Structures are given as C-alpha cells and as structure tokens.
Amino acid sequence: MELTFRSRHVAVTDSLREYTTSKLSRLARYLPLVNEAVVELKQEGGENARRFVVQLTVNCNGTYLRAEERGPRLLPAIDAAADVLSHQARRYKEKVYHSDKHVKARGAAQAGKVAEPVEVEEGREEDEEIEIVLGRVVRVKRFPVKPMSEEEAIEQMELLHHDFFLFFDADVDTYALLYRRRDGDYGMIIPQAL
C-alpha cells in the first residue's frame, strides 16, 4: 500500500511514518486490493494549538473509505481514525462478499420481474425573486469516476459519510448526483441536455 502524507503545522518524522504504516497495515487483511492511502495531518489553530485532526482516505480499486478523528494528542487520534477505517473496511468486505455470493440468485429473481414506473419529483417553480449571494471557489476536488449502479453509489456515499455523491450512472450512461433527503431517503439529480 502506498501512503501519501499531507500535513499542515505537523512535522512528519520517520517514526510517525512507521507508526502510521503499522496501524494501516492491518487493513490488508480486509482489503488486499488497497492501492493507496492518503494521510492528512493538521493542527487546528496553528502550531501552538493543542488539537490535531487526522483524516485517512483509502482507495480500494475505485471505492473510497474515509475516516476523520480529532484529539489533543496526535498518536491517539491516528489510532482512533485507523480503528474507524478498519471497521469500515470490515463492513465493506462483508457487503462485497455477501453481494457477490448472492448476485446470481438476485439476478435470476429479477429477470422475471417487470420494471415498475418510478415517480420523479419535479422541482417547483417559484415566481419570487431570489437573492444571489456571490462567493468564491475555495477548494476543487478531482477524482476518477467509474461507472456504477444506484445501489453502489448509495453504499459509496454511506462509506464516505457524505450527504451527496456524484457518480456516473451505468444504467442511463450519464452523470448523476445522489443526495440524502431530510426524511432519510435519497434523491437523485440527473442532468438532461436541452
């Protein structure tokens, strides 16, 4: 597994690298196909502050797992983030194992079903004036996008603990934005060309 360290106000020493590598090496038991891991370390409030933030992101063949922990000491924060990541990796492996094991049974059962129409919630039009607040882009993220189904996108969004997830929907061959609704269900926005 290739580790990439990014730090802000934290000195990345060889002993810290070895410690983090040993903590993340146990992920290989659950995810043997782990390509890379990004370890982000920062100290909130600058060098004199006493609160550390540790964010671990693991790329497992296109699926991202992420854990973030905060604490007054760096090594316990790394331990806590590694524990959270291990728990996510175990859960992810179980889901993949169980879904692969029963794929044929589900595929055969669904082959006989007729697709039901799905209700699409339309955006409401408002005649009110909307105040536009101008801001600036402060962060840009670039990431590779692999085609996936809605179920895979929901699983990926839950693993990352995000409220939204942009993915390439393999069923309709276009990009889609999945988001969590206030009632706990999910919504999806699919762009259409005019």
Image (cartoon, grey):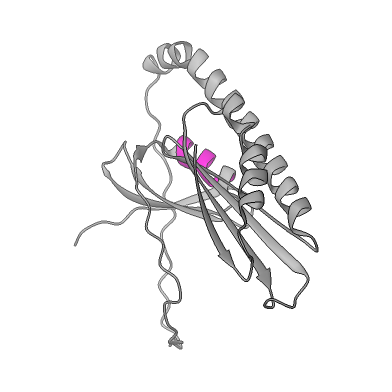
75 sits to left or right of 25: right
Q: Is residue 67 visible?
A: no
On whether residue 152 falls in the magenta region, the answer is yes
In the picture, the quarter occupied by the C terminus is bottom left
192 vs 21, nearest the viewer: 21
23 vs 129, nearest the viewer: 23
180 vs 63, nearest the viewer: 63
Q: Quadrant of residue 115?
A: top left
Q: Residue at x 66, y 52 (%)?
A: 16
Q: Which residue occupies the extreme front position in the image? A: 14
- Which stretch appears magenta? 151-158
31 sits to left or right of 176: right
155 sits to left or right of 149: right
Q: Residue at x 66, y 57 (%)?
A: 54
Residue 172, x across and y down, in percent = 28, 40
Looking at the image, residue 66 lies above or below residue 47:
above
Q: Is residue 57 visible?
A: yes
Q: How many marks?
A: 0
Q: Quadrant of residue 119?
A: top left
Residue 181, x across and y down, in percent = 57, 55
Q: Quadrant of residue 93?
A: top right
Looking at the image, residue 23 lies above or below residue 177:
above
Q: Which residue occupies the extreme left position in the image? A: 194
Q: Main secondary structure of the magenta part?
A: helix
96 sits to left or right of 48: left
Residue 155, x across and y down, in percent = 53, 38
On whether residue 157 falls in the magenta region, the answer is yes
Residue 3, x across and y down, in percent = 51, 46
